[in-house]
Image (cartoon, rainbow, N blue to C red):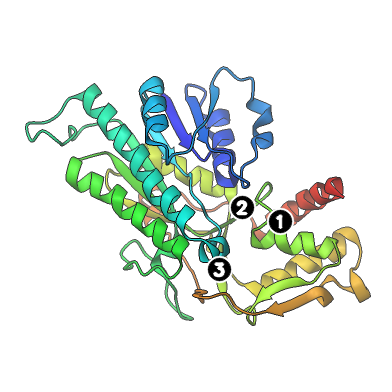
Amino acid sequence: MKLIVTGGAGFIGSNLVLHLHENYPDLQILNIDKLTYASDTGYLKSIKNSKRYHFSKIDLVDRKAVRDVVQRWQPDGVFHLAAESHVDNSIKGPEPFVLSNVVGTFNILEECRQLWHEQEGKTKSGNHLPKDSVKRFLHVSTDEVYGTLGDDGLFSEETPYAPNSPYSASKAGSDFLVRSYYHTYGMNVVITNCSNNYGPHQHDEKLIPTVIRHALSSEPIPVYGKGDNVRDWLFVTDHCEALTKVFFDGKDGEQYNIGGDNEWKNLDLVRQICDILNEEVGEGPDGDYKNLISFVTDRPGHDYRYAIDASKIKKKLKWKPSKDFKEMLRTTIQWYIERYKVKA
């Protein structure tokens, strides 16, 4: 089976490529990534010379380049992760998010549809793929498309979309495009919406790496507002296992929420990171890294709370998060301690 993973040099994408390569020996994997600031092919060095792993540097906004690679590779399936993902950057400059997340998704989606039509033949309607099509397109999205929650409740697959940032709006747009290809063309698609991922190899701009980096540099640790915003945290390899479950076992046209059952207020998470740093590195400034916490002006449209109801994927596909949060948070912090020591 030949797969394309888009954005396979990013944080989640590279972990997914490694997971697929290790656990599915019959797969041929093509990683396509435009290698932005958030990409790092070094994390994939262990499979660089594998005959089952291939890489192409491509910007999904370039329709011709997408067409060429799809026609050349002839994929049986796609894990579509490529996206601009940093909310603050989307506020400063939304255009790249619309291009990458909406136009880029359309390009890879449409080129796959055309290829699979050619391979499997059209139905009498002239535009639908056969109902038993085995070609599958998995679109990876975010819980941020649902907007914000109060102190109670969870996002389910039936929660109406209400994106509040250019990033989440662009992801919502891409979700709707993928959904439309199922209903309009009969394309075999599945959509996943995940909560906040964490783990080794995440880009420096994200919350957990930012806290560790600032702490180790004895710089103020920025916390938006009062730090009351709540997020559900999911270890990246748990996410990868869920994605493969959905790809191989999910029902055509369905949407699956993937969460960690692991809510933390931002401030409480930052304090926990500081406590672990105190233990792992030695007590920080004035005896505690928590003394570096600095509250900064909240960003526009900052959603108060995200929390995932993952009961559907647990019940239908028998998946659940398996990693212990405190253990994996410490493992993650230890990884970044070594990373930033090297940088220093």
Mark 1: secondary structure: helix
Name the mark nearer the viewer: 3 or 1.
Answer: 3
Image position, residue 318 (x, y; %): 42, 48
Q: Point out the tag, 3 or 2, that comes first from the N-terminus.
A: 3
Residue plotted at (45% across, 64% down): 166
Question: Is residue 113 depicted above or below 337 in this figure?
Answer: above
Q: Which residue bears the numbered disc 1? A: 327
Q: Residues within 10 Å of mark 3 (few under 14, many from 20)?
A: many
Residue type (three-letter) at the residue carrying disc 3: Arg
**Residue 283 occupies which quadrant of the picture?**
bottom right
Q: Which residue bears the numbered disc 2? A: 323
Name the mark nearer the viewer: 3 or 2.
Answer: 3
Residue type (three-letter) at the residue carrying disc 2: Lys
Left or right side of 44 for 189: left
Residue type (three-letter) at the residue carrying disc 1: Glu
Left or right side of 214 for 174: left
**Residue 234 occupies which quadrant of the picture?**
bottom right
State the residue in front, 246 or 150: 150
Q: Which residue bears the numbered disc 3? A: 231
Mark 3: secondary structure: strand
State the residue in front, 104 or 129: 104
Image position, residue 89 (x, y; %): 56, 61
Image position, residue 11 (x, y; %): 60, 46
